[in-house]
Amino acid sequence: MTTLEERKKAFENKFAHDAEQKFKIEAQRDRLLGLWAAERLGLTKDKATDYVRSLISTKLERPGDEHILAKISKDLSGLVDHPAVEDKMAEFLEQATAEIVGLET
């Protein structure tokens, strides 16, 4: 294999690894955010699990964070305002990143 082919393969492997890591981090962040929202809604453990699954379905149907933020903000209307949900999402992104990256080291 030539040096150029080796570099291309290494770049492709890094791209795939980074994409997989990003997916894992976002999935963990969304799980943590869903559990946090479920707690504020007073849901039981089983209902909280169902709520997290509904968030995952929302994300799969409509990729992007804005749909999850909108759903949680709507569900928590009167309990927590939208900026607080955004802040929690950012907080859980940092936590999820530390957890996932920490597992790989």
Image (spheres, helix red, strand yellow):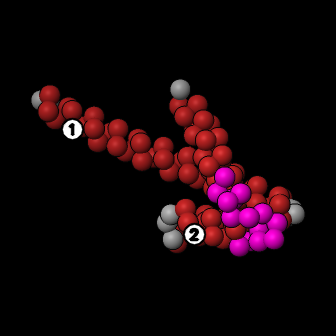
Magenta range is 74-87
Q: Is residue 25 left or right of residue 31?
A: left
Give the crowd class for mark 1: few <14, some 14-19, many >=20 residues within 10 Å. few
Residue pointed to by mark 2: 67
- Report which quarter residue 53 is drawn in: bottom right
Residue 4: in sight, yes or no? yes
Q: Name the N-terminal-most of marks 1 and 2.
A: 1
Q: Quadrant of the N terminus?
A: top left
Name the side, left or right, on which 20 lies relative to 90: left
Element carrying mark 1? helix
Task: Look at 68% across and 64% down and name the residue there.
Answer: 82
**Amino acid type, label 2:** His
Residue at image location 64% in from the left, 57% down from the top = 86
* Label tally: 2
Image x and y of residue 72, in percent: 69, 67
Q: Which image quadrant is residue 67 in?
A: bottom right
Residue 18 place in picture, x, y as percent: 41, 42
On whether residue 77 falls in the magenta region, the answer is yes
Label 1 and label 2: CA atoms lie apart by 36 Å
Q: Which residue is mark 1?
A: 8
